[in-house]
Amino acid sequence: MSDNAAVVGLQWGDEGKGKIVDLLTADYDVIVRYNGGANAGHTVVVGDEKYALHLIPSGIIHADKLNVIANGVVVDPVKLLEEIDGLATRGVEVGDNLKLSQRAHVVMPYHKTQDLLMEAAVSKSRGDGRKIGTTGRGIGPCYSDKALRTTAIRVADLYTGDRFREKLRHIAAVKNAMLASLAAMADEEFEPINAELLADQYGEYAEVLEPHVCDTTPLLHGAMADGRKLLFEGANACMLDIDHGTYPYVTSSNCSSLGMYPGSGVPGGRVGRIVGIMKAYTTRVGGGPFVTEQNNADGDRIRERGHEYGTTTGRPRRCGWLDLMVVKYSAAICGATELSVMLFDVLAGFDKLKICVGYELDGRRVEHMPASAEELEAVTPVYEEVDGFSEEITGCKSYGELPDAAQRYIELIEKTVGVPVGIVSIGPERSQTLIRR
């Protein structure tokens, strides 16, 4: 089995992947981000220092590791440069240890405009309840252009001089026509794209980023040939995967483990360990079905104890009981070899805890995750109620020190999902992590 590994989210994101990537990084040589854009946020806590990362892999905190933003990522140069500068001011080296794929696609300002205008137009046409809940970072429109091809810009295009400028002129003509119509439909203002100004600005960004830019696919193949171990860092999560998530309330990339291969150029079969990250409860942001959502005091308590506000946007997250139908489905899709249960400490103090172990629809048991968002919205959760634990667990030094009720909660996860729990996180710091197996 390959020594390479991946860390992937099994719910709707925000599971705490950054902490586990940071924890595992010591055992790997190259940390690879393979999907998504600056809409994703990973938080790493080291002692008293807290780092919020959006595009740069979490391994950047380790000076001796190579970090790769691979071809499957859509990159906003402005955000990337802000992130590099922010890390540098805090003493984190960002130099030859960060590489950016020439094949990655570039998020442009008009992508963000398109994102917001499309949401506004949909809201006006169909009502706010039908909005996707996008972060407005331009991720979806950039991936759309990737599929359209003629309106796409890749990192490599930034270095083609006059050809880049000419390409921007063509794109501006197309986008101005499209965005003006969307703006009119949404009753919003729209300022036409200035291709010349953009060409100048992005030429400057390209010059600063150039030392980091290379073809990362042969870089990764060369690293593997040299016996170096790769750790893949997924952004977003499986239930936001454009093919396998709660479509259309998803992101615009393959953010399950299945996205690693096209998103990096590393062939299938080269990743032997897949750590599925899950919260001890469930959250999501934006629109879409959420079977175990608690719009009540229980949900509010989880939100406040878990500080459930977006790393990237600051938006309050929707909160609810643990949905193991979701975790079981995602673990199967991702091929998870082990689970990491995060934010377990948030559940301390509840007298009773509920875990969703199945769904019912029209009085019958649902055996598989519905493909239709409308059908998923209509299901009823089948709960198993278990005893809670009153003790705070943040100070536990081993799994055996957890209260009996807490251990039974973990064992029920394993039994229902059919995948062993290897890691239990009981706080934000590295030291607050229990390695079970």
Image: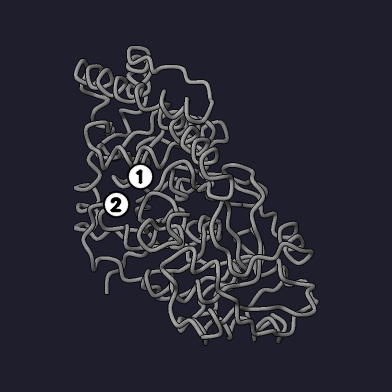
Foreground residue among 308 and 112? 112
Quarter where residue 260 is shown: bottom left
Give the Cα distance between marks 1 and 2.
Answer: 7 Å
Q: Which mark is residue 394?
A: none
Q: Is residue 350 above or below residue 134?
A: below
User: For the point 41% across and 56% down, which residue is it?
Assistant: 234
Tell which circle, 1 or 2, labels the residue nearer the N-terminal end.
1
Question: Could you say where residue 2 lies in the image, as x and y percent from the top left?
Answer: 27, 70
Query: How busy is the neighbourhood of tag 2: few (under 14 within 10 Å), some, or many (20 plus)?
Result: many
Query: Would you say 126 lies left or right of 384 here?
Result: left
- The reply to whether callout 1 and callout 2 are in contact (CB within 8 Å) is yes
10 Å crowding of disc 1: few (<14), some (14-19), many (20+): many
Q: Is residue 413 above or below residue 320?
A: below
Residue in the picture at 50% in, 48% down: 132
The kind of residue tagged 2 is: Gly
Residue 408, position as x, y percentages in the image: 64, 86
- Tell me which amino acid carries mark 1: Val
Q: Residue at x 54, y 38 (%)?
A: 124
Tag 2 residue: 263
Determine whether the residue tagged by mark 2 lies in a helix, strand or loop: helix
In the image, 142 versus 304, the foreground residue is 142
Residue 73, which numbered label?
A: 1
Q: In the image, is 131 to the left or to the right of 74?
A: right
Q: Which x, y percent locates residue 243? A: 35, 60
> Residue 330: x and y, percent?
43, 70
